[in-house]
Structures are given as C-alpha cells and as structure tokens.
Image (cartoon, grey):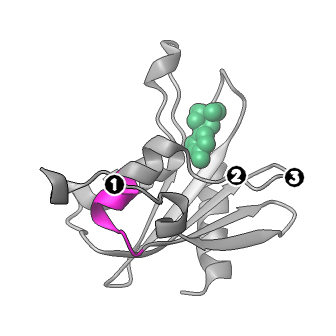
Amino acid sequence: MTDAELIERATAARALAYAPYSEFAVGAAVLTADGRVFTGCNVENASYGLAICAERVALFKAVSEGARAFHRLAVVADTEVLVSPCGACRQVLWEFAPDLIVIVANLQGQMRVRPLRDLLPEPFDARVL
Ligand code: THU
C-alpha cells in the first residue's frame, strides 16, 4: 500500500462525510501492521459537540475489528492549508500507535508526512498511570 493509495482511500471516505453543520468534509484511512486498511469520515450531530473526526472513526473501526498495531494514517480535506489531526485525535492515535506516520493531503495533490511523535510531543499515556 503506497501513500498515494492510502490517500485515495481517505479521499473516497471523505465523500461519505456527514457534515451538514460545518460543511467541512474530512476522510481518513489507516493502514494496520498486518496490511489492512480501515477508512473513516467525520460524522456530525445536531448536538454539535458530539461530532467525531474522520481519524477517530477510522481508528475505532479498526480497533473494533481486532486491529491493534498501525503503521500509517492518511487524512484528506479540501483545503489549501493541509489539515492535521486535532489534539483529541492525536491523543487517541497515540494510545495505539506512538510510531504512527501521519500523511495529510488535500484534493489538489499536496501532501506532507510527519511522525505522530512530532505532532504530540508530550503525550499522556499508560506509562504514568
Ligand atoms: N474534523 C475531522 O474530521 N478531522 C480533523 O482533522 C479536523 C476536523 C472534522 C470535525 C468536524 O466535523 C469538522 O471537521 C469541522 O471541525
């Protein structure tokens, strides 16, 4: 699975976004250590605060299907400035994949690749519990 293919999967997921309130559609695709891909889109709610990001939908789908190890995640939105996962998603991703590589891309074909470790420099995790 190349990064371009993972971005394609995230782009296809983005088309399914349920975002009638923000009208900001986001797609994500996560590649598991055993080669599976799980996709997600953002899902909003009339009670605005209940919206869930595309990244967490993709990750939770994967975890609920038994996946526990992840290599790469692609996120796609239609923006000039590339959309990077929000703080909540960074924390949730960290739980399962501190070594995750995050690929952010837009519909114009621009992309950037960053380790999650750089996006979340002082994580909270089970080591302190
Ligand atoms: N959103 C995502 O799905 N992923 C991100 O990385 C940023 C924000 C969603 C949440 C909400 O449905 C909409 O984008 C606007 O914030």
Which label was assigned to residue 80?
3
* Within-10-Å neighbours for mark 1: few <14, some 14–19, many 20+: some
Q: Is residue 41 visible?
A: no
Label 3: element kind: loop
Q: Position of residue 34 (x, y in %)?
A: 31, 84
Residue 32 position by quadrant? bottom left
Which residue is under mark 2? Answer: 83
Q: Image height check: is 30 above or below 40? A: below
Distance of mark 1 from mark 2, alpha carbons? 21 Å
Which residue is under mark 1? Answer: 61
Residue placed at 66% from the left, 24% from the top? Answer: 20
Instruction: Tell me which secondary structure the magenta stretch mostly adopts.
Output: helix
Residue placed at 65% from the left, 70% from the top? Answer: 7
Q: Image height check: is 51 above or below 102? A: above
Q: Mark 1 belongs to which amino acid?
A: Lys
Drawn side of residue 79 relative to residue 15, left or right: right
Q: Mark 3 belongs to which amino acid?
A: Glu
